[in-house]
Amino acid sequence: MNQSILILLGSLLIFSSSEAGAASREAVYGEGAMVSSRSTLASTVGVKIMKQGGNAIDGAVATAFALAVTYPSAGNIGGGGFAVIHFEDGKVITQDHREMAPGAAHRDMYLDDNGDEIKGLSRSTLLATGVPGSVEGLLGLLRDYGTNTRQEVMAPAIKLAEEGFLLDTDLAKHINTAGQALFKNPAAVKKFTIDGRALQAGDIWKQPDLAKTLRLISDKGRDGFYAGETADLIVREMQKGGGIISHDDLANYRAVYREPVHTNYRGYDVWTMGPPSSAVLVLQMLNMLEPFDLKAMGWGSSKAIHLMIEAERRAYADRAEHLGDSDFYDVPLDMLVDKKYAQSRFSDFDINKASSSEAIFAGAAPAQESMETTHFSVIDKSGTAVSFTTTLNSSYGNKMVVPGTGILLNNEMDDFSIKPNTANQFDLIGREANAIAPRKRMLSSMSPTIVSKDGVPVLVTGSPGGSTIITTTLQIILNVVSHEMPLEDAVSLPRFHHQWKPDRIIYEKYAFSPDTLRALEEMGHVGFSAWPYGRGIGDANSVLMKDGKLYGVKDPRADGVAVGF
Ligand code: DON
């Protein structure tokens, strides 16, 4: 079956007559509710739940469980993530269900006797896995803010896993591309094959073990995952294969509500996730850029890009020094979000000249203060909005499935600074703030964000992409707020990224015109390199509310849809 027939067949099976969906760069319009996610089936599940009377939290929880079935490289129950929620009355909360280091973890656990990193240990082994937070997070959100029952929001995911779904070209290719690494693990082979052969587009793919685990969670709540049979299977696998997650670690895992971090950028309130996320960088960069009229400079102009690169350079230097789990390390958060601090960081900014990353250091904290992810955005007509990013870290995590459960394990431990100033898989470096400690959460770049005005959400956004998540989120906010673009342009226009170190600018095809590139080089910017992977940087599935109307955009850089009614 060719791809267009599959897509047509898929849409006929999926959308009802009153729903609209788009997988292209067009915006989808709705008045009732909207979900934009990486998976067509998951977006549809979320919208259906809200159509049946659920609120945006019910829709988000249902979407997230469905993603664990339909987008297994990043949708998960074996990983973790963050949610930022804006309520109808203007209140904003954030929930952290990031993975935690197991109790037996220690600072140098990935180093050999000489203090050198043992390659691969923090990424492709059972030691790479942090204690998963997704199930606890999703059930907590539903309990505290949902209106539906666990059984109602989980039923669609269970059905998709039990009865299977039509595999499209995108997913079949995605799984088989990961195949070599994935198929070293016998339980992964079982999950990702049918009768011993590779999955193909057009197959109906069932995941009976995952269906059983989801049913246990639906029946028993958190004990369906963190205790009983599922916990036994996880711990047994750990003990067999050199992992260290214990029954105790699972039983003690808790999601946490944290104060959102916030700034006001040109009259708009921007709310995002505090540590252990490093999304505060988005706010720092907005604060640095606020005094400049980016619109007058023009989108894509060398002046505007130069400014943004210099803001990125300074913010990422702060990330390496100051950011980590604030339950363990005294993150100078007030300083980082302070507008005066942002201006002081920019005091050496030269409008005509690039600075060198070697000459940029993190701002000093006052002495007394001490590849795969997925993002979806949900909004309902009341103005309740959920910005949700979840991950296993690398694509399919450590590529290991716990036998009998269908659960893919994360390799999130690699997000710790496993040795000071040693780059992780995203070339990010860190130090003391993000050193490993038992039960500590590893620093994340995931930046689910909501922009509001006068207490009403305007933009719900975020992205996968490791270190590029932060700059992707920044660019979308600037496109909407400063450049006043429609959402479809804000999301689809080409992006670029700088992260202090290495001193290089990664850019998508068409991001810089030849003139712009030349002008940036003349200012002294170095290390231009075209983005080498897939269809582009990030996958920022976003929704926007304007005059009470809802608009959803699926980032055209990856498949999936925005669906609304
Ligand atoms: O939390 C983080 O920052 C990383 N684990 C995210 C990984 C990621 O975005 C990979 N993919 N695109």
Image (cartoon, helix red, strand yellow):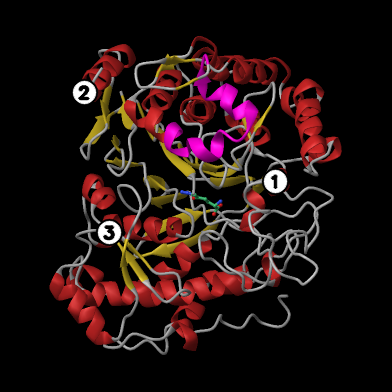
Q: Which residues are magenta?
A: 175-195
Q: Which residue is mark 1?
A: 130
Measured along the vertical axis of the image, is residue 225 above or below residue 422? Answer: above
Which residue type carries mark 3?
A: Glu
Q: For residue 4, which numbered disc appears in the image?
A: 2
Q: Residues within 10 Å of mark 2 (few under 14, many from 20)?
A: few
Closer to viewer: mark 1 or mark 2: 2
User: Identity of the amino acid at label 1?
Assistant: Gly
Distance from disc 2 to disc 3, alpha carbons, whole Å, reads 27 Å
> Does residue 482 appear left or right of residue 68 in this picture?
left
Q: Main secondary structure of the magenta part?
A: helix
Q: Is residue 387 above or below residue 209?
A: below
Q: Position of residue 16 (x, y in %)?
A: 30, 13
Magenta region includes residue 189: yes
Between the residue at mark 3 and the residue at mark 1, the CA separation in whole angstroms equals 32 Å
**Where is residue 3, by image quadrant?**
top left
**Residue closest to the eye, 61 or 390:** 390
User: At 51% from the left edge and 59% from the top edge, which residue is drawn?
Assistant: 279
Tag 2: amino acid: Ser
- Magenta stretch holds residue 520: no
> Mark 2 touching mark 3, by CB under 8 A?
no
Secondary structure state at the residue bearing disc 2: helix
Residue for badge 3: 508
Image side of residue 504 versus residue 206, left or right: left
Mark 1 secondary-structure assignment: loop
Residue 35 visible somewhere in the drawing? no
Tell me residue 305's x, y (percent): 27, 72
Q: Crowding near pointer 1: few (<14 within 10 Å), some, many (20+)?
A: many
